[in-house]
Image (tube, grey):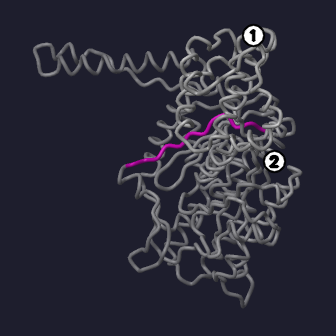
Amino acid sequence: MMALLFLTTVLRPSICSLSEPTDGRPLVTSISDFVVDFPRERPSNTWFAPFLSFEVVLLLLFLDLLAFNEIRDLFVRVIGHIANLCKEALFSPAVETTAVVLVVLAWLLRMDNPIYLLSFATFKAPDSWKVSQAEIVEMMRRQGCFTEDSINFMKRLLERSGTGQSTAWPPGIVQCLQDGKETDRSMDASRKEAETVIFDIVENALRKADVKPEEIDVLVINCSLFSPTPSLCAMVISKFGLRGDVLSFNLSGMGCGASLISVGLAKGLLQCRSFGGKALVVSTEVVTPNLYYGNERGFLMTNTLFRCGGAAMVLSNKWSDGRRAWYKLLHTVRVQGTTEEAYNCIYETEDGEGQKGVRLSKEIVRVAGKCMEKNMAMLGPYVLPLSEQFKVVVSLIARFFTKTLKGMLTGSANEKIAEKIPTVRPYVPDFKRGIDHFCIHAGGKAIIDGVEKNMKLELFHAEPSRMALMNYGNTSSSSIWYELEYIQEHQKTNPLKKGHRIMQVAFGSGFKCTSGVWLKL
C-alpha cells in the first residue's frame, strides 16, 4: 500500500501521460482486458520478464475489488506501460550480465560475514598484588581455619602446580600478610577487584583498537563465580558511557571455557546486524569472595589454582575494519557433556561443615579428555588437510569391521579365530598439519601435559601455556588470551607470522570443551 501511495503522490504527474495512446490505441482499457491479453502480450526476452508473472494478475484482480479506483487505474496504467516497454530490451546484454555478476558477488560477500579481532588486552597486576608460593601458604595459615594437614596439602599442590613465584592475588586477601589486618572478603572488596581488572583491560583494548565506547554495539562479560547487582555489564556501561541501546549480556557459572562462548555469542549477535557492528567481550574471574574456608581436599584445590586476571577483546564484522584487524575468526566449536559425571566434576556447593566452595572431582581429567575428543572430532574437518581426514575415516571403518567381526565369531566354534583378530587403535589426527600455534587452557600442569601428549605436540607448542601458567597462574577463562599474547609478543621458538592459524582450547564446568581457530592477518 505504501508503494501505491508513493506512485500516487510522487510519480503520478509523470505517469498521467500513460493514458494517452502512443500508436493510435489506448495502452490498457481495463483490468479485464489486461488479464485477457497478458499471457499473449507478456514479453519473455528481457531480464525482468519473470517479475511480470501471474502474481501481478492476481494483484490487479484484487485491486479491482477495492474502492480505490484512482490508485487502481494508476497502477494499471503503470503495469500496462511496463508491459509495452518490455517488448524491447531496455538494457544491453553486457549491462544485464554485469548486474547479475554484481548481485552474485554481493550475495557471496554477505554469506562470508567475517568476524575480526581488532585488539585485545590482558590485565597486568601491580606489584602490591603479587605474592610468592611461600606467601600464599602464609596467607592460608593466617585465615585461622585450616588444619596443619590442609596447609601441607596446599603446599604440595603449589609445588606441583607449575605456577611461578610472583602471581597475583586480590588486595583484600593479600592485606592479611600485614600485621594487624584481616582478610577482606566483603562485597565492596569484591567490586573493587572487579573494577580494577575490568576497567583497565577495557580501556586498553579500546585504545589499541582505536574504537570509542559509543561505537560498541554488543557487550558480553563472563565471570563465573561473581555476579553482583547491578551487573558487571552495567558497571562497564556506566563507567565508559556506552550507548543506551547497546546489547549487553552477563554470563556466569560457565567456568574457564566461557571466553570462547562469549566470543561465539558476540559473533552471532554481530552477524544478525544488517550493516555490521562492533562488540566488546570481557573475560575475568573475581577471586576475593571465593576463598574456601574448609578442610575437604576436593575443595582445597581451588585455593591454590586460581589467580587474578582478565582479558578484553574488541570484535567487528565490518569489512572496512578488516584491513586493520589483528586476527580473523575462522571457527568456534563447543561441546557440552551430558552425563551426571560430567555435570558434577566441577560443582559449587557446601562441604560437610557448611563451608561454601567449588569441589573438583577426581574424574575431571577423564571427563575433560572425552569432551576434548568430541570437540576435536567436530573441529577436524574444518582445519585438517584431506590426507589426515582420510586416515581418520579409514581408522573408523577398520575399527567398525573388526569389532563387528569379533562379535560374530565370539561364542561360536571360531572363537579362537576371533582372538587373533587385532584391535585397531583409533587414529589421532596430526593437528599440527593444520594449526601453527596452540593456546591450551592453563588450568594446571597436568592438563597441559595431558593435552600435549594426546595431541602429540612439540615442546614449543605447549610453551605459551606453560609460560602463562608460570607467570600468571590459572586466570580462568582469560588464560587463553595471556597465551596468545605470549605467542604474539614473546615466543622465539615458533614466531608468529602472517597467515598462521592459532587454536585456543579451554575447559569449563558443566562439563564443556570450547575451541576457536584464528587466522593471523
Marker disc for residue 119 = 2
Q: Does residue 80 appear to the left or right of 251 in the view shown? A: right
Marker disc for residue 488 = none
Q: Locate residue 183: give its quadrant.
A: bottom right
Q: Foreground: 215 or 477?
A: 215
Q: Does residue 64 appear to the left or right of 8 in the view shown? A: left
Residue 355 vs 282, above or below: the answer is below
Q: Residue at x 84, y 38 (%)?
A: 320
Looking at the picture, which amino acid does disc 1 mark? Glu
Which stretch did the figure color magenta? Answer: 327-338
Badge 2 crowding class, 10 Å Cα cut-off, few under 14, some 14 to 19, many 20 or more, is: many
Indicate the quadrant containing the N terminus: top left, top right, bottom left or bottom right.
top right
Labels 2 and 1 touching (C-beta < 8 A)? no
Query: What residue sits right under mark 1 in the picture?
Result: 88
Q: Position of residue 312 (x, y in %)?
A: 75, 55
Looking at the picture, which amino acid does disc 2 mark? Ser
Mark 2 to mark 1: distance in Å? 55 Å
Can residue 379 be seen?
yes
Q: Residue at x 62, y 32 (%)?
A: 457
Q: Locate residue 115: give its quadrant.
A: top right
How many numbered dots are placed on residues in this image? 2
Q: Foreground: 500 or 463?
A: 500
Badge 1 crowding class, 10 Å Cα cut-off, few under 14, some 14 to 19, many 20 or more, is: few
Can residue 130 be seen?
no
Q: Residue at x 57, y 21 (%)?
A: 33
Q: Foreground: 171 or 242?
A: 242
Q: Main secondary structure of the magenta part?
A: strand
